[in-house]
Amino acid sequence: MTDLLLRGARVVDPETGLDAVRHVGVTGDKITSVSVEPAPARRELDLSGRVLAPGFIDLHSHAQTVSSLRMQALDGVTTALELESGAAPVRATYDRASDEGRPINFGYSASWAMARMRVLDGAEPDGGFESFAALCGGVRWRDPATPAELDRVVAELEGQLHQGALGIGVLLGYAPQTGRKEYFQVARLAARYDVPTFTHARFKNPDDPETALEGIAEVVAAASGTGAHMHLCHINSTSLRAIDEVGAVVTGAREHGLRVSTEAYPYGAGMTTIGVPFLHPGNLARVGITPSDLVLLSTGERPRDAARLTEIQRTDPGAMVAIHYLDEDDPADWSVLERALLLPDTAIASDAIPFATPDGNLVADAWPLPADAMSHPRTSGTFCRFLGAMVRESGLLTLIEAVRRCTLQPAEVMSAVAPQFRRKGRVQVGADADLVVFDLDAVSDRSTYAEPGLASAGVDHLLVGGEFVVRGGEPLPEARPGRAVKGRLG
């Protein structure tokens, strides 16, 4: 007798290859049956005509507020991790989120950038990406470190690993002059503890010097020299039009046994703080954009020229800005995105940005979202957009392969540092009851750059640890079954 029987759905389990109508039993927070014939249950939910899959695992979500995670739940996400930027101090960030409660599972890496802020600028970070953004105008943290300072940065990261961090997040692209030796030392630390690094590569330019290929090659070289698991964040926006050359390097590295994993998202625009080095006016032409291709999140302003961009970077370096690299309506540009998404074994990850009001305040816990809440549409729509575009509309991926990239692939990236991921990304007896139910004929994103707060369509139900967070297409605002996912050293 199970607590809940999810009856008659098309069940997709990417690890076993199951893609057939089955009945799934849930008791407590675990899957207790996957059967051809329905098992007895205290409650039943008829899911005929729907797909039941493991809940999506997002390796790259800066959107760690309750409100933003609720929007991700409506996109099918059951676990959202802050791994590229990381958090500091890790234990305090975990404790705060656990005390407040979260609708979906959460976790953090150790933050290389904020370790540098603490050592070189004397800053005291207190959280995730929002803390990084607040401190990114610091005077020295982007500078090369002395040997003594480097030792302190590495020691800071090691301490965060022992607080439960899920590896090390390395924002190299935000501090490109820090030197290769330091990055290699960080990779050696990761190898010593067998944890992954999550790297925003140093460069993204198409032409020598400092090309996207050079930035990716540095990550691959660190994997070769140390044996560490090196994960490349948002390979679509790091590689841009060099994706074919980058893809060849990554594929070759894997064929030689190196642990190099990748992720991508299906949007042509990125978003970050406006003060980052790769957005300095002299660098824009190298990636084929101008100041007017940047859009300030708070005001919608497109800087008219280099002088205005420089002024904003000087006065408000932490302001969030959308960067329109590729035109999603241009078939040639969309083809660039497709090639990034189709790179073998690339996980889907959103790079979600937390919702904020125009005055810059985070929308911490409000439902519905304020009408003026702003973010990037990838926060609301990444996974449903991917499924709709790559499975239903183009047929470039089978359903089971697309689901694998949203579930099992990211779970396998995390399984060494956090063994509990061996129970996620699967629809099997004994697996965690983190499940999404969706209508393949309807699943799609609705969010846009002008209206990023529109929830995805087609997600009917979402369970986290066996508890409904979305039911009948509607979020349950009081549901907060999300659990902290910590590294094995913590």
Image: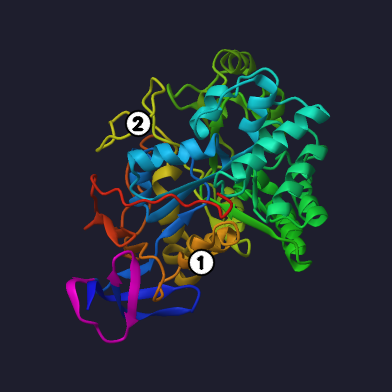
Q: Label 1: how many residues lie within 10 Å, few (<14), some (14-19) or many (20+)?
A: some
Q: Earlier in the sequence, mark 1 or mark 2?
A: 2
Indicate whether 21 appears above or below 64. Answer: below
Residue 114 in the image: state x and y as whole percent: 61, 31
Residue 226 lies in quadrant: bottom right
- Which region is colored magenta? 26-46
- The residue wearing badge 2 is 363
Numbered circles on residues, count? 2
Image x and y of residue 297, in percent: 45, 27
Which one is nearer the viewer's eye here, 185 or 328? 185
Q: CA distance from mark 1 to mark 2?
A: 33 Å
User: In the image, what residue occupies the spot 73% across and 47% down?
Assistant: 189
> Looking at the picture, which amino acid does disc 2 mark?
Val
Residue located at (53% from left, 39% from top):
90
The rendered magenta stretch, by its main secondary structure, is classed as: strand
Q: Give the residue at mark 1.
A: 422
Q: Helix, strand, or loop for circle 1?
A: helix
Quadrant showing the N terminus: bottom left
Three-letter amino acid code of the residue under disc 1:
Arg
